[in-house]
Structure formats: C-alpha cells, structure tokens
Image (spheres, rainbow, N blue to C red):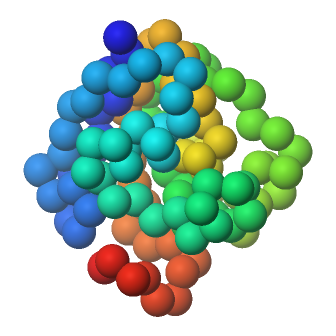
Amino acid sequence: MPKIIVLPHLEICPEGIVIEVDSGISICDALLKNDIEIEHACEKSCACTTCHIHIREGFDSLTESTEIEDDYLDKAWGLDMESRLSCQALVGSEPLVIEIPKYTINMVSETH
C-alpha cells in the first residue's frame, strides 16, 4: 500500500500525517477519508481549484493530468510545476509527499 505524507499545514493538518492508501484512489478522497478536511468546493468534479496541492515527492507516479485539469490549475493560487488538483490525481504505487497550499481561491470557507 502506498503512503501519503502530508506536510504540516497550520489549519488543516498542523502536525502533518502519514497515511496508507489504496492505489487508484484520488488524493482528495484519501485525505478526506483520513479526516484531513481539504477544500473541495466543486465536490470533486474538476470545476474549481480549491483542492490544489503541491506534490513534493512522487509526482511521476500519479496519473497524468487532463487538459481540463491543466486549465483549472492555471487559476490556482501558488501554482508551480508540481501542482495538481487532488480530486483528479490518482495515487499510483509510489509513496507521495504532498503540501497543501496556505491559500485557495475560495474567498469564504465553511470549515476554516
């Protein structure tokens, strides 16, 4: 089972966490199943950028991004070459290290 290492995020995951997940699950679903309340305003339909994350290790093991995901990523706060939408990135067989950005484009959050 691959592991996802979530780097500390002041509000969402202050201590950081290591979770074991099944291959083929989206990173967003894996985080939510482990009580890491990442934003997902569009309910994981690839229609916003609130679940944007940075893949610090293991990027090449993920499924490739689609043109639609790439278009939305262009709108994400703090975009870099290792950015993905966690609702679209499916876990492969390699461990991942992810960082949740400090901000999203959401002006108001119902949970934070």
The residue positioned 26% from the left and 51% from the top of the image is 35
Extreme bottom residue here?
A: 108
Extreme left residue here?
A: 15
The answer to whether 13 is drawn above or below residue 95 in the figure is: below
Q: Position of residue 11 (x, y in %)?
A: 23, 68
Q: Position of residue 107 (x, y in %)?
A: 52, 88
Q: Position of residue 64 (x, y in %)?
A: 74, 28
The residue positioned 82% from the left and 39% from the top of the image is 66
Look at the image and tell me whether residue 54 can be seen.
no
Lateral position of residue 17 relative to residue 43, left or right: left
Q: Quadrant of the N terminus?
A: top left
Q: Toward which corner of the image does residue 88 lie, by quadrant?
A: top right
The residue positioned 49% from the left and 17% from the top of the image is 23
The residue positioned 85% from the left and 51% from the top of the image is 68
Lateral position of residue 69 relative to residue 59, left or right: right
Q: Nearer the viewer, residue 41 or 5?
A: 41
The answer to whether 109 is drawn above or below residue 18 in the figure is: below
Q: Quadrant of the C terminus?
A: bottom left
Q: Position of residue 84 (x, y in %)?
A: 61, 45
Look at the image and tell me whether residue 64 can be seen.
yes
Q: How many marks?
A: 0
